[in-house]
Image: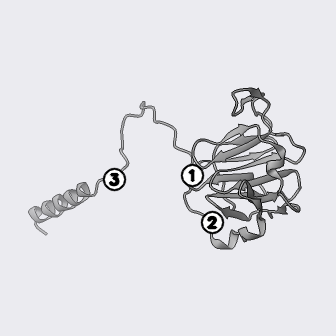
Amino acid sequence: MPASRITTIVAVALLAATGCESPISVSNDTNQQLPPAPAPTSSTRPSNDKLVNAFDYYARTDEDNAGYYFVSPSGSWRCVIVPRTWAGCQSSGGGLGVTGAPRTVTDDSGQSVAPNSILVRTEGDPQFASVKADLFTPPTGAAKTLPFDKVLAAAGFRCNVGQEAGISCVSDHTDKGFTFTTSGAGWQYTDVP
């Protein structure tokens, strides 16, 4: 093959390669400080085989007292999804029971109070809060247990109880959520495996 033809093939290959720019920049400077890689996240929702029937968790007596109520398999945590408003959890003992939680939070009236729950609203960041214990209890009957590695998706939220990760809830509107165990809390949703 003549040298001019090889040069032409190489030039065409280089032009084709530069036409498909990569989102990755390469630097030969070995002293350059690179930013840390972002934590892996997944926007993929679990498949339908992980969903429970939300109807089984719904309780209502009137407009102001309705929700999707569940307890953890151990019975240690009570949780609720208040339709299109908030989702959260509280220890069955009525307190928070999460290591590393703040000593006080500001309630809706501006007072400093001890937190007793963790929640995420339709809008805004997840947070520790002070919520009346009766809001985590169905108006009638007992809350149903949400099995390990199943997802309750209802009214703009999804929650799960992961065997390894703990309890996790997220706002479908903002994709902001929390995951917690008694040893601590994180401000992101953790899907079931």
Q: Which mark is on residue 22?
A: 3
Name the residue nearer the viewer: 160 or 40. Answer: 160
Number of marks in the rendered image? 3
Sequence-first tag of 1 and 3: 3
Rounded to the nearest whole Å, what is the CA distance between mark 3 and mark 2?
30 Å
Rounded to the nearest whole Å, what is the CA distance between mark 1 and mark 2?
14 Å
Furthest residue in direction bottom, as rendered: 49
Res. 131 image quadrant: top right
CB-based contact (under 8 Å), mark 3 and mark 2: no
User: Element type at marker 3?
Assistant: loop
Sequence-first tag of 3 and 2: 3
User: Element type at marker 2?
Assistant: loop
Q: Amino acid at mark 3?
A: Ser
Q: Residue 69: x and y, percent?
A: 78, 58
Other-residue count near label 3 (Cα within 10 Å), few / some / many at <14 / 14–19 / ≥20: few
Sequence-first tag of 1 and 2: 2
Q: For the point 63% across and 65% down, which residue is it?
A: 46
Q: For the point 66% across and 46% down, which residue is it?
A: 120
Rounded to the nearest whole Å, what is the CA distance between mark 1 and mark 3?
28 Å
Q: Nearer the viewer, mark 1 or mark 3?
A: 1
Q: Amino acid at mark 2?
A: Pro
**According to the image, label 1 marks what residue?**
175
Residue 52 in sight from this viewpoint:
no
**According to the image, label 2 marks what residue?**
46
Q: Amino acid at mark 1?
A: Asp
Name the residue nearer the viewer: 32 or 69. Answer: 69
Q: Nearer the viewer, mark 3 or mark 2?
A: 2
Q: Residue 143: x and y, percent?
A: 84, 60
Report the quarter where the C terminus lies.
bottom right
